[in-house]
Amino acid sequence: MHSQFKRILVTGATGFLGHHIVPALRASFKAEIIGVGRKDYDLLVGGQAEAMLAAIKPDAIIHLAARVGGIIANEKYPAEFFYQNVTINTALFHAAYKAGIKKLLTLMGGCSYPAKASSPIGEDQMWNGFPQSESASYSVAKKIILVQSATYRQQYGFNSIVLVPGNVYGEWDNFNLESAHVIPALIRRYAEAAEQNLPEVTAFGTGRPTRDFVYAGDVAATIPWFLTNYDNSEPVNISTGTRITIRELAETVKKATGYKGRIVWDESKPDGQMDKIFDVTRLYGLGLRCQTKLDQGLARTVKWFLQARQEGTVRL
């Protein structure tokens, strides 16, 4: 149990990763862990970041609050994704520095890497080009926090770190078909098709792109180490470095849900970047790994989804 912090604040604690990270923090620190969501403090409202820090008085922050969504949502609401993420991050970062916070840890998406980055994508490729166009409004907004971290460290000595999880999946994810990422969208489609005994399910794109998926519990397990040991504004990828095609993924999710029908591919929908695998050399060099196998993580996620849907606690 670590004891260097007395009170750790987690923004976005009621969200997907927050549900995984808060328990990991409580298991690793003697500190009081305080989780907040938008209903507690709306960081889009001027002065709310300062009011939150004044009321809670944390000495460390895990910043997870963000506007997130899949490709369809990003294409439909690009201005909202850009404005909200830039506003939230800029306001909280500056307020944390002014409040004398000892350490701030935040996350950004792997979609912020250049669209033409070569896989496996190392952290040194971050500034080699523009992100994938379909989600660029979100990706660029999140990417800005790397500049803020480096400049505040340079000018003020403010200790902040930025981590880059791969394509994260797991319990408490968003299963709304308009805004969900690929794994929760597939799980919901196949689970519902199995229950309705449908002969086929439509999947978006060609199925040819390759991705690197990481279980949310594995990401959460690294956070206490980074909060305790890492002191650098250079980002670190957190993923498995394992390649799988979307078509293979669809078949794996189909098996996990028990669906027996056919998968039909709607090639009119965008594929996104064709090959995106993360280089985890830097993560491994720190002695950390994400080891949950995809079929194991999917089984846990499907089980949770079916139960949470019955209880009415899943985001649909």
Image (cartoon, rainbow, N blue to C red):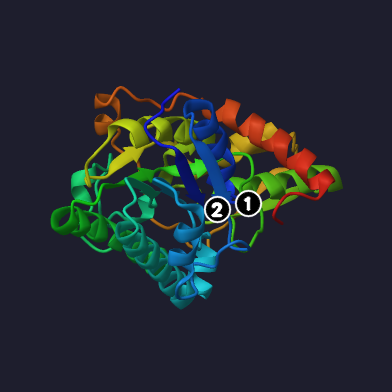
18 is higher (above) or lower (below) than 44:
above
- Position in image of residue 283 (x %, y %): 30, 31
In the shown orientation, is residue 227 left or right of residue 35?
A: left
Dot 2 falls on a residue whose secondary structure is loop
- Position in image of residue 137 (x %, y %): 39, 69
Q: Inspect the image, locate mark 1, and give the three-letter code of the amino acid beneath it.
A: Ala
The residue most toward the left is 154
Q: Which residue is mark 2?
A: 181
Q: Are marks 2 and 1 in contact (CB under 8 Å)?
A: yes
Q: Residue at x 64, y 44 (%)?
A: 172
Dot 1 falls on a residue whose secondary structure is helix
260 is higher (above) or lower (below) than 199:
above
C-alpha span from label 2 to label 1: 6 Å
Q: Is residue 276 visible?
A: no
Q: Which residue is mark 1?
A: 185
The image quarter in which residue 284 lies: top left
Q: Quadrant of the C terminus?
A: bottom right
Q: Is residue 27 visible?
A: yes
Q: Give the camera-side residue of 139 and 59.
A: 59
Label 2 crowding class (10 Å Cα cut-off): few <14, some 14-19, many 20+?
Answer: many
63 is higher (above) or lower (below) than 291:
below
- Position in image of residue 8 (x %, y %): 46, 43
Say which mark, if any, is on residue 53: none
Q: Inspect the image, locate mark 2, and give the three-letter code of the amino acid beneath it.
A: His
In the shown orientation, is residue 303 left or right of residue 278?
A: right
- Position in image of residue 154 (x %, y %): 14, 55
Q: Residue at x 25, y 55 (%)?
A: 149
Label 1 crowding class (10 Å Cα cut-off): few <14, some 14-19, many 20+?
Answer: many
Q: Give the camera-side residue of 307 and 149.
A: 149
In the shown orientation, is residue 7 left or right of residue 255?
A: left
